Amino acid sequence: MSETSKEQPDLPQPWRRLESRKVLDNRWMEVYIDRVELPDGQPYDYTVIRRFADGVAALVFDEENRLLLEREYRYPVDEVIWQLPGGLVDPGEEPLAAMQRELAEETGYVAESWEYLGAFWDNPALTAMKIHLFLARGPHNSADTHFDRAEFLEVTWRSWDWVKEAVRTGEIQERVLLSGLGMLLARGWC
């Protein structure tokens, strides 16, 4: 039997929302329990997080091809993790402007050149939020940092070899950083 003559399974079908109930509302997000009808006709309760903004992050490389990384304690996983500089897009702000602002606020760096790498869904099982990724080059430290109230960061430069080894050993586990590295891999960086 040829590949094209095999019977194709039914493609996934959209769900139909029957009702939506807000269960949490704060400055970061709204959480809903949506009653949906599944493709087989059965009802199902689904938790949805609605964020008020998309996110941004940047892979910032210096003239030695080192990557600018942050280390920050993240309460939900109870660990200090490696991550990229980034944050949320303010209302009315373009993603690039948001990323340039976040880079300066978190690290004190500004970059000479910027390239948009693309966007990805943050966690499409829970939210429609997207993360916009940028590549920045020519950084220089010329801005004052301004941290959010719960932001306590260490900013450090790491070699490309160190980054690849940290991914291989599982020291780097954060989804935005891994997605950014995947985008570089797709462009032939590795």
Image (tube, rainbow, N blue to C red):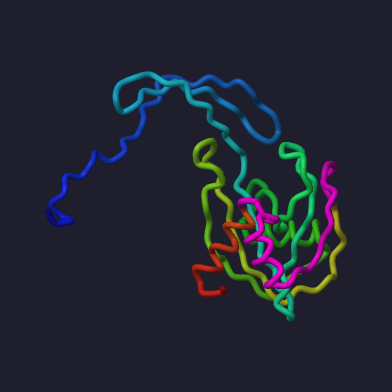
- Tell me what residue is drawn at x 52 percent, y 48 percent: 121
- The residue at 51%/72% (across/down) is 187
Nearer to me, 110 or 35: 35
The magenta region covers 147-175
Examine the structure image and report whether residue 157 is included in the region drawn in magenta: yes
Q: Magenta stretch: residue 16 in it?
A: no
Q: Nearer the viewer, residue 182 or 34?
A: 182
Percent of width and height locating residue 174: 65, 51
Q: In this picture, is 22 found above or below 180? A: above
Q: Quadrant of residue 161?
A: bottom right
The percent coordinates of residue 189 (x first, y second) are 56, 74
Q: How many marks?
A: 0
In x, y percent, where is residue 25?
A: 65, 26
Q: Position of residue 87 (x, y in %)?
A: 70, 51
Identify the residue at image location x=52%, y=22%: 33
**39 over 1 or under it: above or below:** above
- Residue drawn 12% across the image and 53% down it: 1
- Quarter of the picture containing the C terminus is bottom right
Task: Determine the image quadrant of residue 162.
Answer: bottom right
